[in-house]
Image: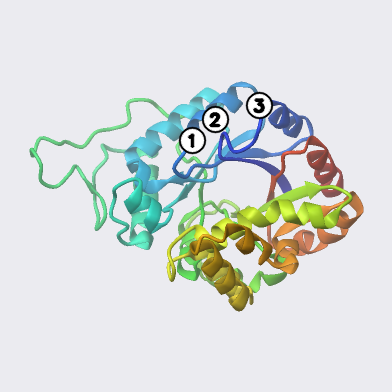
Amino acid sequence: MRLGLSLGYWGARPGDAAPLVREAEALGFDSIWTSEAYGSDGVTPLAWMGALTSRIKLGTAILQMPARTPAMTAMTAATLDMLSGGRVLLGLGVSGPQVVEGWHGQAYGSPLTRTREYVEIVRMALAREQPLEYHGREYQIPFAGGTGLGKPLRLTVHPLRKRIPIYLAALGPKNVELAGEIADGWLPIFYSPRRENVFLGPLDAGLKRRAAEEPFDIAPSVTVVLGDDVSACRDSVKPVLALYIGGMGAKGKNFYNDLARRYGYEAEAEQIQNLYLGGKKMAAIAAVPDTLVDEVALCGPKERIAEMLDPWKRSRATTLIVQAAQPEALRVMAELMG
């Protein structure tokens, strides 16, 4: 199992992330990953870190598809891949209705159709086999209507690689199935190795229809907090879980809340959401069960983390993306996974 490092949102952590990235590269980590929501973008910090490293792969987890056209994403991926010597891993996701419509001013539309068409267009643009032309439900290239002056164009640069690996962030069964079918990898968040059966049926159904011959990378993220006080380590994870389960989406349209329910935490998920949306954030954080934290994160001293790693090692995951701000946590993970 390979190791990755999640840098998350730029500005979300104090200080400069460069020392942590250099430590990860020195320890043999395979990749680093950046994120974006409605603050920092995911590409600029990744390019910055790419310039400070030489070997480690550069992943986006994720670029929001509604934020940029598929042609722009192809341009960005090709440029960064050339600058970095072929190190880009292109993680994509549709985000949620609140961000898509409330921040980007785009219709949420049909996420499954948008994802399938988007990936097809990005791959066509990078392949440069012909001028880009695409006529789908979500995307029309050239644009249908307008001035009528649009014409099919071809990427002017020759990509270092004609097929840059594309990863999809997916939680719902249909989205997970689509990732297995059309992507090179899958980026699940809040993954519980003890409950893989929640995902594996849809994923395997998609993999059966997959045309690509390259290995498929299952790359969940896991928060790692190293320390002697297990409760304190868990408490540092709970605010993020409360935010996503309680506040990342509206009532009845929160993918993370749905996932907690599918894990068997129906009552807890409802309580966390009600508290969070009711403005009682501290109470929502306190309502996050310790058991849920232990399913999706690694908290405590080295010996406890080693024991809790067993389900991850037995899982189908092929890359483990570590979310950690402690250099010593990276060293422990490298030792335990070595």
Tag 1 or tag 2, which sits nearer the N-term? Answer: 1
70 w.r.t. 231: above or below: above
Residue 25: which quarter of the image? top right
Residue 32: which quarter of the image? top right
Tag 3 or tag 1, which sits nearer the N-term? Answer: 3
The amino acid sitting under disc 2 is Pro
The amino acid sitting under disc 1 is Ser
Element marked by disc 3: loop
Residue 16: assigned label: 3
Q: Is residue 220 visible?
A: no
Residue annotated with mark 2: 45
Q: Residue at x 75, y 60 (%)?
A: 312
Within 10 Å of the Cα at label 3, are there few (<14), some (14-19), or many (20+) other Cα atoms? few
In front of the other: 108 or 31: 108
Camera-near label (2 vs 1) is: 1
Q: CA distance from mark 2 to mark 1?
A: 8 Å
Residue annotated with mark 1: 40
Q: Residue at x 32, y 41 (%)?
A: 69
Q: Residue extending furthest left?
A: 147
Q: Are marks 2 and 1 in contact (CB under 8 Å)?
A: yes
Q: Quadrant of the C terminus?
A: top right
